[in-house]
Image: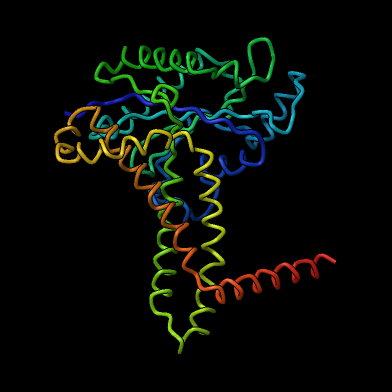
Amino acid sequence: MAAQYAIMRFAKYKGPEIGRIEAHDERTKETYASNPDIDASRSHLNFHLVEPQRKYRAEAERQIAEAGCRTRTDSVRLVEVLFTASPEFFQGEKKKEIREFFQEALTFLESRQNPKTIVSAVVHMDEKTPHMHLSFIPLTPDGRLSAKDIVGNKKKLTKWQDDFWEHMVAKFPELERGMSASETGRDHIPPRVFKEMTRLNKQREKLEEALAGINIFNAKTKASEMSKILEKYIPGVEKMDTLMKKYGSAFKSLKAENKALVQKNESLTQELKDSQGQSVLKRMQELQLKHDYEEAIAVLERIPPEVLEIYAGSKKRSRNKKQDLGR
């Protein structure tokens, strides 16, 4: 049987993005085109262990104000903890057993953080693997707002992982200890980055099809067609560029490892039977992400100048129209 890991990951949020996190966690949107893994027909199976009393941001601001904390625009106002386990751990388990796992995770967090600061703890059953999003306001016992003091540096994150595993293994002895991003030496690349790349790849395919079919007879029609594709594609590339920079440390050693991974590929099936194999597969996925990103940039260099002129003109007209409406 494959190794089964207890998984805990932290993410920090400062301001406007808190609303987006809440929309995802609380399933307040009608559709989730950005996350194809969500099966809306199963969303009724999701459940809370801590119900939010207010909007996440409103509750954070309320508690921060009551504590008398000063804030800056870059102050972390919310910490989200993702609790889950390897997919194999949940296979065949009933909702009662799954609930017990996440209740233990909540109990662990409450032993380390004032329960009153927990805004929400919601378990998602409508994606491939059950997981819990737990959001709390990073107020310290002495009333300071400091995610840094609570979540800590590499050493403290390692202690978090040690303590979490020790707590969970007491009730679930089959679990092994997961690794934090700091221990693996790189940032954790969240699934949404891969999903964003998948969407960009589809747009790139459309663009490449249009480029392949362009000739002197249909150039004008094709140029207009490609301009419309670029209206989505270029902002998509810009967004991916931002994400790749944000998680750039994850790619520090990928170039050096690429050669080693090719050599390991022959024995990959065997390696996947142990935990190291999972790490190899993850790195291969990250290498593919980097490759796809480079391809997304490269295709822009093949766009004919006349197409870019049409696109630029369309953007300029759009800006002028917005300015006129704003007057």
Residue at 58% x, 26% y: name it.
Answer: 136
Residue sitting nearer the eye, 235 or 258: 258
What colour scheme does the image use?
rainbow
**Residue 91 location, x and y as percent?**
24, 35
**Residue 74 location, x and y as percent?**
69, 32
The picture quadrant where one finds residue 255 is top left
Residue at 77% x, 19% y: name it.
Answer: 68
Q: Is residue 151 left or right of residue 62?
A: left
Residue furthest toward the bottom? 217
Residue sitting nearer the eye, 225 or 57: 225
* Up/down of 53 relative to 311, above or below: above
**Residue 252 location, x and y as percent?**
43, 34
Residue at 67% x, 31% y: name it.
Answer: 59
* Up/down of 320 relative to 154, above or below: below
The number of numbered badges drawn on the structure is 0
Q: Is residue 3 left or right of residue 13?
A: left
In the rendered image, which quarter contains the C terminus? bottom right
The picture quadrant where one finds residue 286 is top left
The picture quadrant where one finds residue 126 is top left
In the rendered image, which quarter contains the N terminus? top left
* Up/down of 100 relative to 15, above or below: above
* Up/down of 196 relative to 301, above or below: above
Residue at 43% x, 16% y: name it.
Answer: 158
Q: Is residue 277 left or right of residue 289?
A: left
**Residue 184 location, x and y as percent?**
38, 25
Residue sitting nearer the eye, 228 or 46: 228
Residue furthest toward the right? 327
